[in-house]
Amino acid sequence: MNSCRISSLLLVLLAGAAQADTLYKCADSAGHTTYTNQKTPGKTCTVLSQDKPISTFAAPKVRANAPTPEGFPRVNSETQKNRDNDRRRILEGEMRAEQQKLEDAKKALAEQEAIRMGGEKNYQRVLDRLKPYQDEVQLHERNVESLQKEIDSQR
């Protein structure tokens, strides 16, 4: 009795799995098209796909690394180290200059925040006056952050 229940349960599961692998394109009398995995009575249905994957996308092709051409210029390791050191020195110089600009921008912003002009009774006018100084500080902060990432990637 128990094996009979198990076998009937397996048959039901297998029938459901077989039906789920079939894709139908059904059209009703009004011409509306429906895509489904269940054949609908009263509609004209055609099988689009059965026991195949439904996706139409092909797997991406793996490209093999092309060998370096014969005449391609090569750089020895000492030359490359010198270039890397030069690049690092340039980036560090740019970083120092950008940090100085950031400090100057912060100082200018602090000076402007300390000033209260008589015609700025409305606080929005104060905010409008300070906005370019705040933008300048943010610009230099982003530049410092970008240069630091670039320097860190050199290591």
Image (cartoon, rainbow, N blue to C red):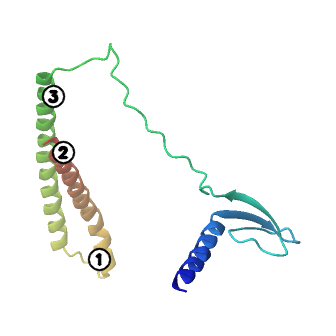
Three-letter code, disc 2 = Ser
* Mark 2 neighbour density, 10 Å: few (under 14) some (14–19) many (20 or more): few
The answer to which quarter of the image holds residue 79 is top left
Write the residue at 15% across / 73% down. Answer: 114
Residue 112 placement (x, y as % from top left): 19, 68
Q: Which residue is mark 3?
A: 83
Query: Which of the two residues, 93 or 58, is positioned nearer the viewer here?
Result: 58
Report crowding for label 1: few under 14, some 14 to 19, many 20 or more residues within 10 A (C-alpha): few
What is the C-alpha distance between the residues marked 2 and 1?
A: 49 Å
The x and y percentages for residue 55 are 59, 55
Q: Amino acid under label 1?
A: Gly
Query: In the visual, does 103 lie left or right of 129?
Result: left
Disc number at residue 127? none
Location of mark 2 (residue): 153
Closer to us: 43 or 22: 22
Quadrant location of the C terminus in the rendered image: top left
In the picture, the quarter occupied by the N terminus is: bottom right
Residue in the picture at 33% in, 14% down: 70
Q: Which residue appears at 56% of the width and 75% of the height?
A: 10
Residue 51 is situated, as x and y percent measured from the top left of the image, at: 63, 58
- Pointers 3 and 2 in contact (C-beta within 8 Å): no
Say whether disc 1 or disc 3 marks the residue closer to the N-terminus. Answer: 3
Residue under pointer 1:
119
